[in-house]
Image (spheres, rainbow, N blue to C red):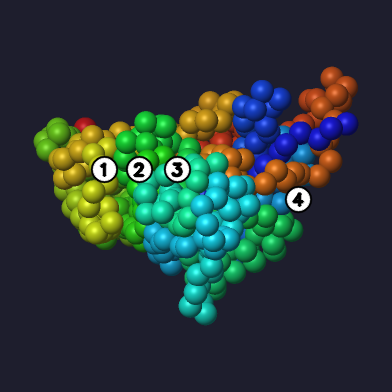
Amino acid sequence: MLQDDFRVAIDIGTTKVCTIITRKRADHRVEVAGISVVPCNGMSKGMVADSAAVTAAIKESTGIAAADARVDIKSVYAGLTGSHVESKNRWANVPRPEGMRAVTDLDLLAAKKAAGAIDLADDRRLLHVIPRSYALDGLHGVRNPLGMHTGELHIESHVITGSISKITELHNAVSDAGLRVSSMVVEPVASADAVLTADEREEGAVLIDVGGGTSDIAVYHDGTVVHTAVIPVGGFQFSNDLSIAFAIDFDSAEQLKIEHGTAAPELAGMQEEITLNPSTMDQPLTITKREIGQVLKERTSELFRMIQLKLEEPHLADIPTDRIVFTGGGAKLDGFLNIAKYIFQRKVRLATPRGLDGMPEGTNDPAYSAAAGIALWGMRNLPAENHVGEQKSVAVSSESDATADTPTGALSVIRGWLPKREQTKEKETAGA
Ligand SMILES: Nc1ncnc2c1ncn2[C@@H]1O[C@H](COP(=O)(O)OP(=O)(O)OP(=O)(O)O)[C@@H](O)[C@H]1O
Ligand SMILES: [Mg+2]
């Protein structure tokens, strides 16, 4: 039997590990065959802090997704982020025989090689070399030079590197789970692949994935990435601020943020009060939604200022970036887009992943953009490679369908998150 083209993407985020198994259908559309999300506390600011915890979460998440898709996972694309990820655009001369000649496929291969021939510091590793454009005898901005005549050929590419030790830590956390890393995909690029429209990529847009521990930035123009950056601030810091401001434990602060948080306190009702029962205090604490919003607004504004600084790059001066597309769980904060519109004075929207068919209900969420994007990026840019072992037969008898080894199913997996929330809810009382 001809094996389907399966790819496995894992997003090892600061708050969760998300696995998406995709299958390419005969009509070339890509559909979700299995998905799972499990909480993970082993990462800090996008990097491995507790490798055993990360490996355990990877094992759990890939195990559930594999059961869902009825496959054995052998290898994966792993998402990578953290402020060690750096990028720059560079021009390289493509060596070719002298004289006017048409650009061939071999020249394009040589171009890719020349683009990646970079002197790296001892502790840096090349992650991506993404071709942006070509120059033919000084004529810039050529996107596809194949067949065009030129003497000299130059390539401009977006080059992304990372710290060898940070990459190795993530690599080991995956291989300790018994999985081979077939490739790493840098998360800002992955998220952009999952959320930006063709128009946004073409005309210019800034993608910002606000996660739990990082905010990943990717700027697109003329169809490709022109800038990437990672800021080590995400939703964790928002909750942490609440925890400090109101002297409550982190879990209560997290719950408070999700249930009553807003980044636009001026839009919140003055009178709306919330009574907290912090585990650290004997007495209940009554605060207004406005007070919560005040703390969150400050952190939001601070994050936006950091983003603005990251966008103040000389090579971005002429890039039209009047559209900002937010994704990631952190961007779901109420009022977030209001403040963004005000500070950036640009068009803003909150995006969920697109381009994958069959995302189960409940997973069409900004928090899953990176995972969806890792799968899509791999499909579009990396050589065909099957990530799964033998596909398990689906044609089992109907009675065995109801037995314990029936795949858990994506929805029940996602429900796996919920009990924790229910418990924490009891700790707090939404006040009058
Ligand atoms: N409704 C909500 N309002 C505010 N914040 C939210 C909401 N839902 C989720 N979040 C926040 O989103 C963050 C998690 O987002 P996400 O799942 O995208 O992060 P991650 O991928 O685990 O982390 P990272 O990408 O930084 O490594 C958490 O800080 C969580 O508090
Ligand atoms: Mg993330």
- For marks 4 and 1, give the CA distance: 40 Å
- Category of crowding for the residue at label 2, using alpha-carbon neighbours closer than 10 angstroms: few (below 14), some (14–19), many (at least 20): many
What's the amino acid at mark 1?
Thr
Nearer-N-terminus badge (4/3): 4
For image coordinates 27% across by 46% down, the residue present is: 319
Q: Nearer the viewer, residue 86 or 45?
A: 86
Instruction: Specify which label sits upstream in the sequence, 4 or 1.
Output: 4
Q: Amino acid at mark 3?
A: Arg
Q: Position of residue 213 (x, y in %)?
A: 40, 56
Residue density around tag 4, few if under 14, some if 14–19, many if 20 or more, within 10 Å: some
Q: Nearer the viewer, mark 3 or mark 2?
A: 3
Q: Amino acid at mark 4?
A: Lys
Which residue is most to the front? 99
Q: Nearer the viewer, mark 4 or mark 3?
A: 3
Mark 4 or 2 closer to N-term? 4
Q: Amino acid at mark 2?
A: His
Q: CA distance from mark 3 to mark 2?
A: 12 Å
**In this figure, which residue is indicated by the disc labeled 2?**
221
Q: Which residue position holds label 4? A: 74
Q: Which residue is mark 3?
A: 143
Relative to the observer, which residue lies in front, 4 or 328?
4
Location of the C terminus (image quadrant): top left
Q: x and y percent of residue 258 in the render?
A: 34, 41
Q: Quick one: which residue is furthest to the top in this view? A: 398
Ranked by sequence position, the earlier of labels 3 and 2 is 3
